[in-house]
Amino acid sequence: MTALTRALRAASLAALVLCGAAQAQAPAPATTSAAPPPLSAFFGNSPFGDAKLSPTARYLAVRASAPGQRDFLMVIDLDTKAGKIIASYSDADVNGFYWINDTRLVFDTHEKGVGPGDQRFAPGLYAVDHDGGRFVELASRTGRSANEGSRTARKLLPVQSRIAGNMPWEGSDYTYVASAVGNMKGEMSHVDLLRVNTVTGQYSTVPRPGNTFGWLLDHKGEPRLAITHKDLTRTIQYLDPATGEWRALASSPIFQETADTIEPLGFGPTGNLFVVARGKTGLKALHTLDVATGKRDPQPLLSAPGYDFDGGLVVNSDKVLGVLFRTDAMSNEWFDPSMKQVQQDVDKLLPTTVNLVSVPGHATSPLAVVTAYSDVVAPIFFLYDTRTKALNKIGEARPGLQPAQMGRQQFFRYKARDGMDIPALLTLPPGAQRSGLPLVVMVHGGPYVRGASWGWSPVSQFLASRGYAVLEPEFRGSQGFGSQHERAGYKQWGLAMQNDIADGARWAIDKGIVDPKRICIAGGSYGGYATLMGLVNDPDLYKCGINIVGVTDIGLLFDNGWSLSDDVSRDTKEHSMPEKIGDPVKDAAQFKATSPIQQAARITQPLILAYGGVDRRVPINHGTAFRNAVMRTNKNVEWIEYPEEGHGWSLEKNRLDFWGRVETFLDKHIGSGAAR
């Protein structure tokens, strides 16, 4: 790869960061424009990716780009106010980056202009100093050796190597990477942990205590936990620093959650282990666990009524300061009094946004990075000085968008027909109208995952800017709201899960929010499946559908023998999917009744079918077979295929093309065009 010179751009960006308004204000309201923002404002590549402070906060690393250019990595010296691009390529984009110590970083790459089907290279892994010096290629993008063909050739890390975790305040040039090892069937057999010298590139393999699939480093950045699999049992192994021996802390079934199931989260400076476990209420909470006894404190350290704990620790060199976790939205919860004060000070400066505070490694560092967002504000990054309380803007994920152009969003719960509470997000278009609106019911994929959180989203805000209300239900089966809510969705594809979605649309009708004659259902993956089954089950409710990479034949999820690129493991198909989706033999009749391919003739509404040509999760055969079946009786079907795409749209040009088509489709069937 050839580095490009961008010194002028580095200098200008550094000036923007360091010489911005001394007291940055909250995003200001603006008058709603006559025309909504363009598609590119929502679905174009973001010009700003991330910002991270070095452990002492001497340096600030930023990933950014310019129009038509690759993403680069720049470091700003916060003492001298000088900025320099330290990694920039003509054939790759800088992706993730991490501080190894106060002067050295590692990063990997990707190709944002190349779809999954055309990817030529792996992400690679590289190390470089803050000033661009001592650049070292650690992991190959192609499988070759460093300096291949020369007498100084050395062995690089395996192609699929990723940073395993790092505590950069120790000042070491070493780090650890995790490397997945596959078997002859293309499945992952185990994960190695490698200790890497980022200056020489030399590495060694950490001995495994068994068939290891996960690792966790302690507060000093050394291996302390390993998760091993044997038969169908998952065991958390602890490397005792006193003896240097591994011993089992806890065991539980891999594919079933029991009272003994814990999720290790991280270590504190004293060696205490923080874990997530489900309590008697059915909700997950944050606990501490005594590594000497393997017993967890029965009293949760942190829990959130109505939500599973979902988050991570915020730590520095001295202590666990708090957590970053999700309820209806992402937010910080601080244990440390000084950080509570910092949060209060930041919130006073930015009163209209949720403000996530990220701290550097050293406890004495006076600076922090703040990520501010809301339902109408895409993430904005600030540098905050705790001494002067100055807040300087670093960059914006979506510059140019004004809050008044966006739709307000609320999190709420409605009743399903059997009385179950269904969490949901409702986004209303900007403006005064709050009744008789056209509605898009947007169904999340998974389905056994958490959907969206409160906050700015390109899809919901794009649709709201075009005048549509957007409903995003967390139907039964969705994670994040307790075991009862999740397990109620087992074996309910096309049944109670589908009813929950329809009940949300009817709730919006009953409240007078939406026009019952202008409702469209849409979604990706499982959401695409639910789109098709919604058109089958509730033809009088939904006037059109948008299926994005949706499942059309449930049986094909279990039997992808014709596809060598299936990305679901054999064990998952045998031991997890039968419990959650159904048994392909015992539940064959249900599969037939609830597979869209078997019900294609019943779908007469206008329909978009969109698929990626190299999708490994839902291969395009799902789409082509259903297209051929539905078009025998429904001529109002728009087929969209992106040959180079996988399970979703990674390329900017395809996102712009697709959502432009959606805009036209919705306008014709439930928008202003439908009334003409």
Image (cartoon, rainbow, N blue to C red):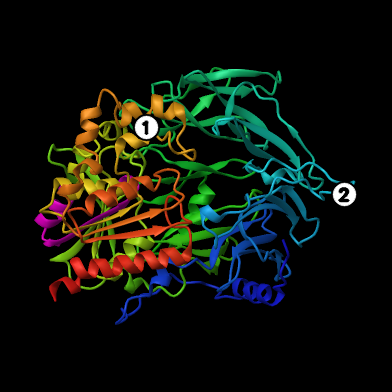
Task: Estimate the x, y position of residue 531 in percent, counting from the top left.
Answer: 25, 50
Which residue bears the numbered disc 1? 558
Give me the residue at 50% from left, 71% from top. 24
* Location of the C terminus (image quadrant): bottom left
Callout 1–callout 2 Cβ contact below 8 Å: no
Taking the image as drawn, is residue 429 in sight?
no
Give the SS element for disc 1.
helix
| Residue 525 is one of the magenta-drawn residues | yes
Task: Estimate the x, y position of residue 138 in percent, counting from the top left.
Answer: 73, 47
| Residue 301 is one of the magenta-drawn residues | no
Q: Is residue 225 left or right of residue 350?
A: right
Q: Which amino acid does label 1 sit on?
A: Phe
Viewer-closest of 553 and 340: 553
The image quarter containing residue 258 is top left
| Placement of 455 over or under 491, stated as above or below | below
User: Mark number for residue 150?
Assistant: 2
Q: Mark 2 packing: few (<14 Cα in 10 Å), some, or many (20+)?
A: few
The image quarter containing residue 33 is bottom left
Task: Estimate the x, y position of residue 198 in percent, counting from the top left.
Answer: 76, 46
Distance from label 1 to label 2 (Cα)?
48 Å
Viewer-closest of 211 and 311: 211
| Placement of 213 over or under 247, stated as above or below | below
Q: Which amino acid does label 2 sit on?
A: Ser
Q: Is residue 454 left or right of residue 604?
A: right
Give me the residue at 30% from left, 32% from top. 581
User: Which mark sits nearer the N-terminus, 1 or 2?
Assistant: 2
Viewer-closest of 612 and 241: 612
- Identify the residue at the far bottom of this view: 34
Taking the image as drawn, is residue 248 in sight?
yes
User: Which segment did they paint magenta?
Assistant: 503-526
